[in-house]
Image (cartoon, rainbow, N blue to C red):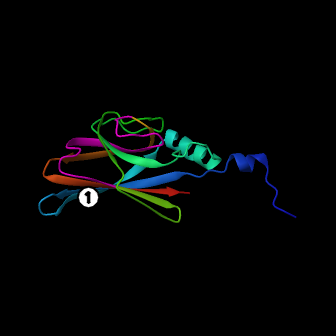
Amino acid sequence: MGIVYNKSMILHSKVIPTGKVLIEIRDAETGKLKSSDLADNMFVTAGKNSLADSLRGTTASNKGIITYCSLGTNSTAPALGNTQLGTEIFRKLVSVRTVSANVASFQTFFTTSEGNGTLREAGLFGDDASGTANSGTLFCHVAISRTKSSSDTLTLTWTITIG
């Protein structure tokens, strides 16, 4: 006899994406690490909905695909209902994508001329995202507290665990 599932068991099954963001600022001239922090990442509702649409087989070829990393200056705490950063100041294509088992990683490198200022938030965008601020679907939002100058480089490495 096969396994019997009742409706309650099916409705309460959850796959919860979680993650961390490694934030590294380096001196551009020497390459010396100036600061490094690991922050908890929030996978927001809009990103979860996009992921579910992708699993369902939505016809859009870019559905569920993360393409851009954005930086912002707003210090309001991230919330599940966010659909964009509070104050986006710079956006760049994700540099490196990897996957190992149920963990996806996204790394973006910001040069000395990119994203300078007092950074208070960062996010990952996808679906129909472009180089335009606030475009696309916000997948992940994290609060940070870093100041980046034109003598620094910044690397953000996001790890998202599905499960």
- Name the spot of residue 154 as percent of width and height, x first: 24, 53
In the picture provided, is 151 more to the left or to the right than 46?
left
Q: Quadrant of the N terminus?
A: bottom right
The amino acid pointed to by label 1 is Ser
Label 1: how many residues lie within 10 Å, few (<14), some (14-19) or many (20+)?
some
In the picture provided, is 1 more to the left or to the right than 13?
right
In the picture provided, is 89 more to the left or to the right than 34?
right
Q: Which residue is mark 1?
A: 36
Q: Secondary structure at mark 1?
A: strand
> Residue, x 17% and y 63% (percent of image)?
31
> Residue, x 36% and y 52% (percent of image)?
94
- Name the spot of residue 138 as percent of width and height, x first: 44, 40
In the picture provided, is 123 more to the left or to the right than 56?
left
- Name the spot of residue 67 as percent of width and height, x first: 41, 48
Q: Is residue 78 above or below residue 146?
A: above
Work out which residue is located at the far right of the displayed protein and give it. 1
Q: Is residue 143 above or below residue 103?
A: above
> So how many labels did they put on this image?
1
User: To which quarter of the image does residue 28 belong?
Assistant: bottom left
Magenta span? 108-134
Q: Is residue 1 above or below residue 89?
A: below
- Name the spot of residue 72 as percent of width and height, x first: 29, 39
User: To which quarter of the image does residue 140 belong?
Assistant: top left
> Residue, x 52% and y 47% (percent of image)?
64
Q: Quadrant of the C terminus?
A: bottom right
Question: Is 14 a magenta residue?
Answer: no
